Image (cartoon, grey):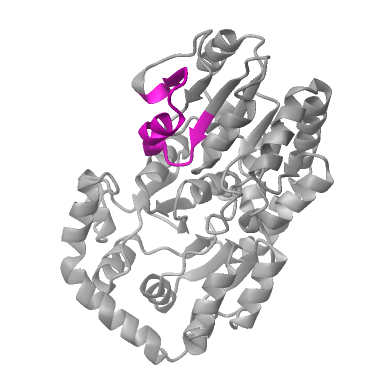
Amino acid sequence: MMNGARTPTPFSLAAYRAAAGLASLVAEPILRSRARHGKEDLGRLGERLGHASTPRPEGPLVWMHAVSVGESLSLLPLIAALRSERPGVWLLVTSGTTASAKILAERLPAGAVHQYAPVDTPDSVRRFLGHWRPDVGLFVESELWPNLILAARDAGVRLGLISARMTMKSARRWSARPAAARTMMQSFTLLLAQDVATEQRLGALGGRVDGRLNLKRLAEPLPCDPAELARLQSLIGARPLVVAVSTHAPEEATVASAVADLASNPLVILAPRNPERGTEIVRLLSPGRIARRSAGQTIGPETTIYIADTIGELGLWLRLAPFAMMGGGFDPAVGGHNPMEAARLGVGVLSGPQVANHAEVYAEMVDAGAAQLATGAADLGARIVALLADPDRQADMAAASARYAAAQSGQMEAALGLIRPLLPLA
């Protein structure tokens, strides 16, 4: 482990701090503008400026930060483990999106509180740290905000970057400022990388990686409403079913067109990554027998496409079929989405080839027979049709996926062994 020792602030980080200080003058108007577009929580804008909306509990406190929904969900098993091990330690969980705040409000246990992360201006950070006074800060994946991290380090917070993921693009950007990168890396007492590529990139930037941890391999199964699941299963009946989740354009059209002419009349459920695209998808796929969940429409015998344009129901759609198409794999700018969400529910996975964000997991799942990577749109369509015609192959993929997910559980205990030395005593 590193010492988290303080080093002189490089010029680029000092310039960033000065610029962020000037930005603080317009931070509130920008946040209010974002709130008008649904990108911020208007009632909790104060939290984004470092004004806490709840008192700090007495006693030791561990702060955990995740940027969005996926990272927040990946924290839940670690949160449960820490609550079990150190019941006298409070947990503060911060995130930056309204969707993550909603999910965490529903799923955080007693002894854990959610706040929005402060914007990275000196005043907001100072107010946040002055109120919460965390003993430990655990950052998940790639949230490297200089003011927040350096101020926490200077305040004596023991910092860890866990389940770290750094893309080649981010590594190149940081490598252009080597002194700044080294200062950031050496602010962390503990570094745990998701994969070999991240481990190498963090090391090249001056970090010393202490081990491996990919929290997205360990997250809890996505929840669903059992009554709603049973209702949908009844509506679908014995019809062949294709489920495509976390999709991006033009993946919805690819999936729909692949099965449009099949005599078996399959139902296609499309759950876009951004639910607000529901109207756009209906327009792109029309004319057709389309129902849209956000409009209160339901699945009927004549429905061929069901647009699942809602938030927080991914666990519902994945439970409906033995395999699912996971979106984001045809655009290198997206880099694929997490196949473990399906694997933990015993669901086989199809995706495109651009899965750099989860390359190791996809490679392992392909080797295990739990996933297939299509080379292009035509190949994806052919694979969907082939699976629909072979229920035994669907069942084999589903079983392989469940076995793969079950095999990941040992990572948590190994990671806890590295995290424990940072934790305060209760």
> Which quadrant is home to the N terminus?
bottom right
- The answer to whether residue 408 is magenta is no
Seen from the viewer's position, the closer of residues 356 and 20 is: 356
141 versus 159 height, above or below: above
Q: Provide the residue span drawn in magenta.
A: 270-294
Horizontal and vertical percent position of residue 69: 47, 46
Horizontal and vertical percent position of residue 180: 47, 85
Horizontal and vertical percent position of residue 13: 38, 84
- Give the quadrant of residue 190: bottom right
Residue 4 seen = no
- The answer to whether residue 292 is magenta is yes
291 versus 146 height, above or below: above
Horizontal and vertical percent position of residue 260: 60, 24
297 versus 197 height, above or below: above
- Give the quadrant of residue 416: bottom right
Instruction: Tell me what residue is drawn at x 72 percent, y 35 percent.
Output: 382
Seen from the viewer's position, the closer of residues 83 and 344 is: 344
Relative to residue 297, is residue 418 drawn left or right? right
Q: How many marks?
A: 0
Seen from the viewer's position, the closer of residues 55 and 118 is: 118
Relative to residue 52, is residue 213 drawn left or right? right
Instruction: Tell me what residue is drawn at x 28 percent, y 57 percent.
Output: 48
Instruction: Tell me what residue is drawn at x 59 percent, y 63 percent.
Output: 165
